[in-house]
Image (spheres, rainbow, N blue to C red):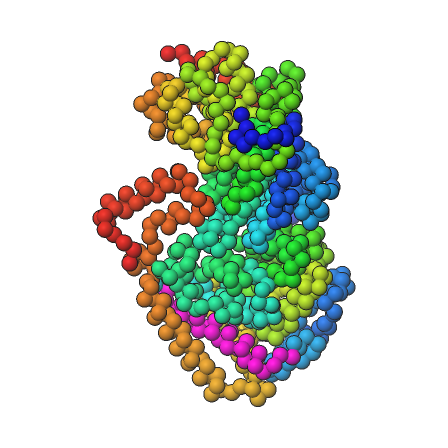
Amino acid sequence: MPESPSADTKTMNMIEAINSAMDIMLGRDPNTVVMGEDVGYFGGVFRATAGLQKKHGKTRVFDTPINECGIIGVAVGMGAYGLRPVPEIQFADYIYPGLDQLVSEAARLRYRSANDFICPMTVRTPFGGGIFGGQTHSQSPESIMTHICGVKTVIPSNPYDAKGLLIAAIEDNDPVVFLEPKRIYNGPFSGYYDRPVEPWSKHDASAVPEGYYRIDLGKAARVREGEAVTVLAYGTMVHVAKTIVEERGIDAEILDLRTLLPLDIDAIETSVKKTGRCLIIHEATRTSGFGAELAALVQERCFYHLEAPVERVTGFDTPYPHSLEWAYFPGPVRITTALEKILKD
Amino acid sequence: MPESHRRPASNLPPLSLHIPEPRYRPGDTPDFGDVAVPAVDATPRPSEATKPDAMRDLCYGLVRVLDFDGIAKGPWDPKLSAERLRAMLRYMMLVRAFDGRMFRAQRQGKTSFYMKCTGEEATSVASTMALDRGDMCFPSYRQQGILITRDYPLIQMMNQIYSNRGDHLLGRQLPIMYSAPEHGFFSVSGNLATQYPQAVGWAMASASKGDSRIATVWCGEGSSAEGDFHSALTFATVYNAPVIFNVVNNQWAISSFSGFAGGERTTFAARAVGYGIAGLRVDGNDPLAVYAATQWAADRARTNNGPTLIEHFTYRSEGHSTSDDPSAYRPADEATAWPFGDPIARLRQHLETLGEWDADRHDAQAIELEELIKTTQKQSEKLGILGHGMHQPFETMFQDVFEEMPWHLKEQCDQMLAEQEAKFGPNWKPE
């Protein structure tokens, strides 16, 4: 499955793979800097930057004030100087104070200055629920990001992809929001919260090359071939979808979108035209979620190939509840119901 | 609201909400007799390495050099040569002539918008002259003086204002939102105070690379209320960033007087105190004081002694922009009642007092600059004016959103081109 073969691979979970991507880029490019709340000496609340400050020095990897506007604003200025900043926002739920700097500044700098200034920044941030994080540590704001013109949005679903995509994101000369599904940092998630967590080491994608490789942005991955229905998913939901279709013996084709913008429309179109049915799954709230965009695109491009209405399985339009987390999460029951509906005719 | 929420909670005296109100409104006679004007030599000049806590008084005083008779005095006198003083006067006069001409161009319907900096010329011209050429400026929207002082081609400014085919920003930006990296001038945003943390980031990058260049940034007293301002000061103090923060306190943020940014309670320079950075409050209509304060702050930053916040105490003599009518909210003669005079008149008087300038030379220079602007304007207008013909190929709308155009923008671009072809025919080209 690796796109770029490499002799020296190591078993890594997603945190280790993300750490390795930053380590590689800090080593390759003296202009790369990593910063954020608690990322320095401590190595990040999820350990994604563990050991990087010690290895690369305090001016390359450092802690910041608790101020997301400042973190992203400062990164814009660093980019204008010629650095390649990789700021971490500790939880995606905390990104909102920095949103103006992202929407009005980072995203539009190249355009408004006609290439006088660019913003080669990669904002890393853990997102999504399933960890009892309550309404301020569980949100999925990806459709806010895809609605900004001038920002790329990337969501990996496994260690191998996480490293290759993060390296490509850091090397990209435009701002990238790199959303890390924190539920699967330590192992893929089946969707059954009451079953033991399987570690990444049992998954093929945990074999990660130790050196440099990149996965180009804008390319989806087909994680399962099938004829009956196309399932479009990303992040945590790729694994949940896979568990459910395999348990139910459904001949589904699953596309892991990996990059939401730019989107791999060719892969989507090819698959949906083949299967004639499309189920979209995301954890984010439903209304104006990225699923709405996907449903519209499928309708515009594949309408005459469709044999059933496009279905969406999503989180509900409520804040992410703490105690009722698993009633909110688009888990096995919601997915199975949608699959049965889409496949019934 | 339920009745129960309206009842006083007790028999204590009722609270009252303060809504700031400027002292004078249209029809009133403004009197600024009580505005503190400290003596020219009353403000000490500490060393550039002074700890912020040991120089707090400067946040509440006023750095001055020129008295109202045109004499330079006191410890802040930068003792510039007559040649430098004449250059400063020339740049300020050029800014004013440029403003006058471009304001009229907007009124003549040649562009959509313009912003003058009348009365505030010193806060960008004198400030820029005290910097090194490589230092990076992060302007707000009223710092045309930076570009003019760094000899940026006037025609390029005009082309941008007209969004014509010479506009290197391809007509994408509102007039005056210039971008000039070769002249150390960051792209003007249009959102307020966003440039503040960006300047800090640039300064941090310069420091982390062991560079010797510093960053400077401007905002108005009104936008010092933005969160970005406070984010920037926090980062600057945390990392001891080599940056100069300029707050141009021109008393008015469109129709809101400085009281709506907290100006009734303390000075804007005093914002520095809470952050533990150096603060200076300067007579912004005194070009030599602005120069001296900037030079002090630049030396401080360049020797790793940290950031400085400079409040330029000045007055916005004209409207906020061409879209504003200040007579609707303040007395028409408030500008003339302002006790600190006009920066150009004051520098002229100083040069004349020194015997280095006279009325004939002044008038001749005014005519020369007016001619220069007029000639340049004609050249620029040959490249087009806004709203008369199309000056950029349509597809430029979709370029530079990303380094490489993704498929969805290509599709939208094709759609737009088809729309234009339907409208103008297949052989259309930009004029």
Compared to residue B295, the image places residue A6 above or below, namely above
Q: Which residues are magenta?
A: B79-108
- Residue B422, image x, y percentages: 24, 45
At a point 38% along the width and 49% down the height, the residue shown is B397
Compared to residue A275, the image places residue B36 above or below, namely below
- Residue A338, image x, y percentages: 46, 17
The residue lying toward the viewer, choosing from A49 and B75, is: A49
Q: Quadrant of residue B205?
A: bottom right
The residue lying toward the viewer, choosing from A248 and B139, is: A248
- Residue B177, image x, y percentages: 46, 58
Does the magenta portion include B234?
Answer: no
Q: Quadrant of residue B413?
A: top left
Q: On the picture, is B334 further left or further right than A300?
A: right
The residue lying toward the viewer, choosing from B285 and B231, is: B231
- Residue A308, image x, y percentages: 37, 18
Do we see residue A329 in this rendering? yes
Q: Main secondary structure of the magenta part?
A: helix
Which quarter of the rendered picture does the C terminus of chain A lie within?
top left
At a point 37% along the width and 41% down the height, the residue shown is B410
Q: On the picture, is B291 further left or further right than B394?
A: right
Do we see residue A70 in this rendering? no
Q: On the picture, is B171 further left or further right than B209?
A: left
At a point 63% along the width and 40% down the height, the residue shown is A24
Q: Quadrant of residue B112?
A: bottom left
Residue located farthest toward the front when viewing the structure as drawn:
A7
The image shows a total of numbered marks equal to 0
Does the magenta portion include B93?
Answer: yes
At a point 49% along the width and 20% down the height, the residue shown is A224
